[in-house]
Image (cartoon, helix red, strand yellow):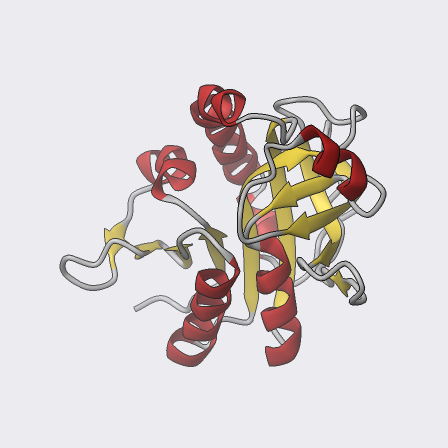
Amino acid sequence: MNPIAAALLYATPMEAAPLLTAMAHVPVAFGQESLFLAGDVLVALSGMGLAPARAMVARLSEEWAVRRIVNVGVAGSLTDALAVGDVVQVSETFGPDAARDGVRVDGPALRAPGLRSGARLVSRNAPVFDAALRVRLSGQADLIDMEGYAVADECQRRGIECLMFKTVSDDACDRATLLANLDRTSRRMAAFVLDHLTHLKARSFVP
């Protein structure tokens, strides 16, 4: 088996499908649909929520000794400054308890055309889809998802380098918009990953 350069961590099969379609890949075990090997990269599906995301980071660390995890997928926007389809690199995450300090995403910044950087992300165990809550959370973060904080926190605990990229799929106000944009924004993320895969695997980025 080739050495594992990095793991790409998605939450759901729908988010990962465009990338897996574009890359030659095999499940790491017969009948197993949560972990795939694509050359020297693992593509992992954690499932939705903070606990499953944390558990997958632990598995990648303990079973595969992965030293870099790249968390990719879709997220809702909490600010009008981000539009559907934007690709954003996250630099800090917050959990459901807003009183706790944030967790930095410590991987190097990637410089790429059109990439928005320096975003803050808050993660909750349920979608928002609530305009009033969206306004309150917008004072804390730019994006919202259900996994990113757990990924960054568990990576920090285990000494794993973490990078995080999200494609804006909706404005965190209703489920219909998310579902309508999910395929298009997942394909947008797949194209981004494929365009920059060499850098995402590298130990450091070239400015």
Q: Residue at x 48, y 61 (%)?
A: 53
**Image mark count:** 0
Q: Residue at x 40, y 59 (%)?
A: 40
The front one of 69 and 171 is 171
Quadrant of the image containing the N terminus: bottom left
Q: Residue at x 60, y 54 (%)?
A: 148
Dividing the picture into quadrants, the one containing residue 139 is top right
- Residue at the extreme left: 30
- Residue 187: percent from left, percent from top: 46, 27
- Residue 115: percent from left, percent from top: 72, 33
Whether 180 is drawn above or below 59: the answer is: above
The front one of 193 and 133 is 133
- Residue 126: percent from left, percent from top: 53, 47
Q: Residue at x 51, y 67 (%)?
A: 54
Is residue 78 left or right of 180 when viewed as pictured?
A: right
Is residue 59 left or right of 73 when viewed as pictured?
A: left
- Residue 98: percent from left, percent from top: 77, 58
